[in-house]
Image: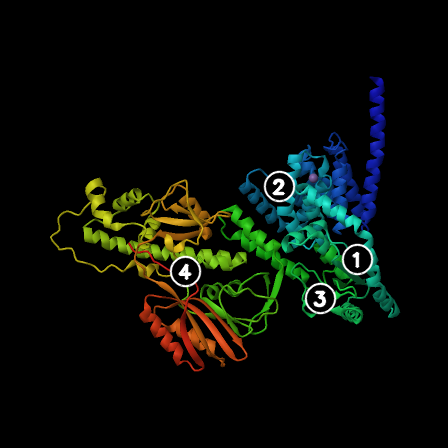
Amino acid sequence: MAEQVESFEIDLEKERKEILNAFRGLLRSCKRRTKADTAMIRKAFDVALEAHKEMRRKSGEPYIYHPIAVARICSEEMGLGARAITCALLHDTVEDTHITLDDVEDLFGPKVRLIIDGLTKIPEVFDQNASIQAENFRKMILTISDDIRVVLVKIADRLHNMRTLGSMAPDKQLKIAAETKFLYAPLAHRLGLYTIKSELEDLSLRYTEPRIYEQIEANLKSTKDVRNRFIRRFTAPIKEALSEQGYKFEIKARTKSISSIWRKMTTKEVPFEEVYDLFAIRIIVDTTQALEKSDCWRIYSIVTDFYQPSPDRLRDWISTPRANGYESLHTTVMSPSGKWGEVQIRSKRMDEIAEKGLAAHYKYKESKDSDSKFDRWIAEIRDLMESQHNNALDFVDDFKLNLFAEEIYVFTPKGDLRVLPVSSTILDFAYDIHTAIGDRCIGAKVNNRLVPLSYQLNSGDQVDIITSPKQRPNEEWLRFVTTARAKHKIKGSLNEERKLIAQDGKEILERKFKQHNIRFTHENISALEKFYNVNSGTELYYRIAKGKIDLTKLREIENQHGLLQVKKKTKRPVKKTKVAPISEIDQKKDTIIIGEDFKNIDYSLAKCCNPIPGDSVFGFITINEGIRIHRNNCPNAEHLQSKMAYRCIRARWKGQQTVERVASLRLKGFDQVGLVNRLTEIVSNQHNVNIRSISFETIDGIFEGKIKVLVYDTYHLQELMGKFELVEGVQRVERWDDGADDYMEDTTG
Ligand code: MN
């Protein structure tokens, strides 16, 4: 008994020494610190040590190792200062020990309190429930605006937990690893913490796909010598030339991270052998800020003296830094053995920003406008969060879009630069300029070529948006856009339109009531709402306008159910009011018909409501199983239509009147200045014709255009074709068929 106690005490003594060593290591890593900084860090260490003294991690080691390690990541790998180190040391105290926020404020002041408060609000592991997880993540992002260090310390915390994940239970490992990949790695990336992002992804892969991870790791090890020899031979002449010219520089060969090799293997569907030797070397030049740009370009010129560059793979992020502040010159060159290799050229300052991300900006604050770019990003996040997302998952989806995206740089006709995420379309661009431009966009001229709404932009494109006052957003647009802003604006416009349509429905109902001599009273309206199982007047009117509610049954409802109060005897004969055909209200919507015409569309009938022919139905786009058809009064319908409206498409049973069709036209002729403009003008001025898509191509002066329009009948189409034929330069206009997908049918009641 006594012996046991003794040996325990000896362990404690040894542990205490080790803990002190770890702390000294932390202090040494924080190079630029004042006496006051040291005192603050030491005080934080003492407080944390005392508070956590009874606690041990899952691995058995004293808990204090964790905050020390997190603080060291902040200092060494993120380049953060004394206050962040202090906060990192204290980050778990308020949540897990007797220390309170008031204690923290008393000891370290209000700023540290604010950060610890932010950190404490972010749960260690998010709840099982996906929507709660998203909501929490949103709260976490909100704290950014208080102090960015909250998020940085949190990422450091997660990094250390990932590094020590081995001692956790397997089910927890998987959850934490997945969460890291889903939330933290993209966040680190967006903040410019590239190295940390790679490590988070690698660690995550190690636990989510252990066999793949181990295999790639082993393969990398066995090919290491070949790779190193190759890189040595490749860099030798560059080194020599740079030294000759008196540059102070460092060359680093970058090993691809395991997760990025795996990503390449899966996205390109190639084996390890085709990926492992893709190499990247980095030349870091030690120079003054005044000379760094010209030095980088001079080094570029030296490199390309030895190796042939690929002209379309030159990336100049020095003249135009990325939104998160990244600056570098990238080129891809051909090595003598015929392999392409990436060469990154940057100054020491740029390298520090690339490695340590945002924190390094503070150090060089006065130098560039990178701070205003970061501010812009914060402002975008703000924008997103302040817009009304009734579903937190929606928010995360939209937000993730922004996180993963790399940027492209495009220009307005006047040459103003716009930064958009990769795969943005001209519609994203239009909404980025102004909502009104987006809402009225019918196409654009990209580098003087007319392109449709769905056209994806590339860096360097010059975009001239074409608008028409008749244009309105529709559901389909949501598939064309990438940016959260455009999505949000389109959804907003669609809601507005829904209200307008409901207004029409109200008028239709008023007229119907009049015909049937039914009073337009609150009681009667709510009786109808009940009968048709809708929960608001707006919804009722909207469905009426859309022809989803059969008003011919009014008499029946009145007779059989006695629901509706009828006006007492009026002699006045019922005047036949001309009811506007619903098709006119409805014409702009795309409709998919279920039936033999659409055998190629993969759909199934929902089990929850078992729709049968004649039911009013809609289609829901499932992730893996094509389109599922639900009844409009299915118990799930409201949820699907309100929360996932963008995945709902209209559907109806075949056999009802066709009102509007898509017609495709092909035009050929000689390219002339302003020709495409004249053609689009004709379409937008033509009454009753709507453009669905439009594309033009010119090869050696001969243009071919394809225009899809929505028309009522062949008369309208002939008229349009006639006008096209009159345009100077147009040689031929013909009908053109590209399959049944464009067959349209409309709803009439
Ligand atoms: Mn922690």
3 or 4: mark nearer the eye: 4
- Image location (x, y in percent) of residue 435: 48, 63
Amino acid identity at mark 1: Ala
Disc 3/disc 1 C-alpha distance (Å): 21 Å
Q: Which one is in front, 683 or 186?
A: 683
User: Would you say the residues marked 4 and 1 are in contact, meaning their CB atoms lie under 8 Å apart?
Assistant: no
Which colouring convention does the figure follow? rainbow
Disc 3/disc 2 C-alpha distance (Å): 38 Å
Amino acid identity at mark 2: Lys
- Image location (x, y in percent) of residue 119: 65, 43
Judged left or right of residue 531, residue 268 is right
Disc 2/disc 1 C-alpha distance (Å): 40 Å
User: Of the residues under marks 3 and 1, which one precedes in the sequence?
Assistant: 1
User: Of the residues under marks 4 and 1, which one precedes in the sequence?
Assistant: 1
Against 386, is 331 above or below? below
Which residue position is annotated with label 1? 253
Which residue position is annotated with label 3? 318
User: Of the residues under marks 3 and 4, which one precedes in the sequence?
Assistant: 3
Marking on residue 121: 2
User: Would you say the residues marked 3 and 2 are in contact, meaning their CB atoms lie under 8 Å apart?
Assistant: no
User: Would you say the residues marked 3 and 1 are in contact, meaning their CB atoms lie under 8 Å apart?
Assistant: no
- Image location (x, y in percent) of residue 201: 68, 48
Residue shown at 84% from the left, 39% from the top: 21
2 or 1: mark nearer the eye: 1
Residue shown at 20% from the left, 49% from the top: 518
The answer to whether any part of residue 124 appears in the image is no
